[in-house]
Image (tube, rainbow, N blue to C red):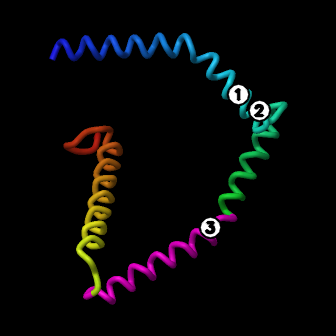
Amino acid sequence: MASKLVQLQSKACQASKFVAKHGNSYYKQLMEQNKHFIQEPATVEKCRELSKQLLYTRLASIPGRYETLRKEVDYAKNLLKNRSNLKVEDAGIAALFGLECFAWYCAGEIVGRGFTFTGYYP
C-alpha cells in the first residue's frame, strides 16, 4: 500500500511539473484559437448583454424541448400499452435507467446533508 502511495505521489509530481512547463503555452494557444469569441472591451454592460442573450436563447428553446418531452412520454406510454411486445433488453435498460436516477437522487441527498450519511445538520 505504501509503494502505491509513493507511485501516486510521483505521478502527481510529474503531472504538476508538466502543467507548470506547458500550461502557459496551452493557454495561449487556446486563447489564440478562440479569440473570435472574446468580446472586447470586457465591460459590465457587455457582460449583462451577453447574459441576457443567453437567458433568452435558453427560454426560446423551451418549446422545442417540451415537444421532445411529449414525444418521449408518448413513446413510453406506447411501450406500456404494448407490454407483450416488450423485449428483455428494453426492460433491462429501463431498470438500469431507474437505478441510475435513484443513485443520483441518493447522491444529491448526501450532498444536501453536507456529505453525511446519518442526517441533516441541526
Considering every residue shown, the one lying at the far left of the view is 1
- The quarter of the rendered structure image containing the C terminus is top left
Is residue 61 covered in magenta?
Answer: yes
The amino acid type of the residue labelled 1 equals Met
Q: Nearer the viewer, residue 92 or 53?
A: 92
96 left or right, relative to 64: left
Measured along the vertical axis of the image, is residue 92 above or below residue 120? below
Residue at x 79% of width, y 46% of height: 49
Quarter where residue 16 is shown: top left
Measured along the vertical axis of the image, is residue 73 above or below residue 101? below
- Mark 1 is surrounded, within 10 Å at the Cα level, by few (under 14), some (14 to 19) or many (20 or more) other residues, namely few
Determine the CA span between mark 1 and mark 3. 32 Å
114 left or right, relative to 73: left
- Kindly state the secondary structure of the residue where label 2 is placed: helix
Report the disc number at residue 31: 1
The amino acid type of the residue labelled 2 equals Lys
Determine the CA span between mark 2 and mark 3. 30 Å
- The quarter of the rendered structure image containing the N terminus is top left
- Kindly state the secondary structure of the residue where label 3 is placed: helix
> Of circles 2 and 3, which is in front?
2
Kindly identify which residue carries mark 3.
62
Residue at x 81% of width, y 40% of height: 46
Instruction: Measuring from the top left, give residue 22's x and y in whole percent.
Output: 57, 15
Residue at x 54% of width, y 73% of height: 68
Q: Please give the range of residues in magenta.
A: 60-84
The amino acid type of the residue labelled 3 equals Ile
Instruction: Measuring from the top left, give residue 48's x and y in whole percent.
Output: 76, 43
- Mark 3 is surrounded, within 10 Å at the Cα level, by few (under 14), some (14 to 19) or many (20 or more) other residues, namely few
Considering every residue shown, the one lying at the far right of the view is 41
Report the disc number at residue 35: 2
Is residue 122 covered in magenta?
Answer: no
Which circle's residue, 1 or 3, is located before the other in the chain? 1
